[in-house]
Amino acid sequence: MSLAQFKTKVKPSFDTRAEVARLQAELLAATNQRNDADAASIAVMQLVVNAVKGDPNEGEDGELYEAMGYIRQSERRTGLTRRGTIAKAAANAAGAK
């Protein structure tokens, strides 16, 4: 087999690899464009959320606020946790070892 014949036979492999590299670069560019667009969209969405929160008829306790995926102010937990008897028993058992 001559060098020219060899190059002819492996050319499709190299062409396909070059196409994959080009497509990966295109995908990276499109992903970066999407991320930039998402950042701008999130800023606009936050303005809408702030407008709903500031509306005296809706606010942070309204149905629209909840429909937007947020938890109403009246449904939020306080964050206070108390250790129950089961947790105390487990802590005592762990300390006894």
Image (cartoon, rainbow, N blue to C red):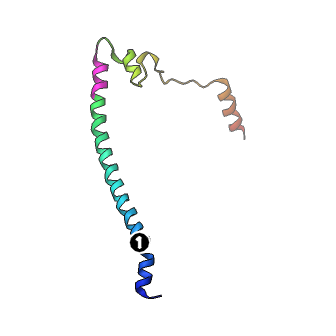
The residue at the point 40 percent across, 85 percent down is 4
Q: Quadrant of residue 48?
A: top left
Of 3 and 20, nearer the camera is 3
**Image location (x, y in percent) of residue 23:** 36, 58
**Image location (x, y in percent) of residue 9:** 45, 77
**Image location (x, y in percent) of residue 82:** 57, 23
User: Mark 1 belongs to which amino acid?
Assistant: Phe
Q: Which residues are magenta?
A: 47-55
Of 35 and 47, nearer the camera is 35
**Image location (x, y in percent) of residue 21:** 37, 63
The residue at the point 41 percent across, 72 percent down is 14
Of 97 and 56, nearer the camera is 56
On the rendered structure, is 57 left or right of 67?
A: left
On the rendered structure, is 8 left or right of 43?
A: right
Query: Vertical placement of 65 versus 34: above or below?
Result: above
On the rendered structure, is 56 left or right of 5?
A: left
For numbered disc 1, what is the local secondary structure? Answer: helix
The residue at the point 68 percent across, 26 percent down is 86
Taking the magenta stretch, the answer to whether it contains residue 48 is: yes
Query: Vertical placement of 13 versus 75: above or below?
Result: below
Taking the magenta stretch, the answer to whether it contains residue 89 is: no
Of 45 and 13, nearer the camera is 13
Query: Vertical placement of 44 versus 76: above or below?
Result: below
**Image label count:** 1
The residue at the point 71 percent across, 35 percent down is 93
10 Å crowding of disc 1: few (<14), some (14-19), many (20+): few
* Quadrant of the drawing holding the C terminus: top right
Q: Main secondary structure of the magenta part?
A: helix
Write down the residue under mark 1. Answer: 14
Q: Quadrant of residue 11?
A: bottom left
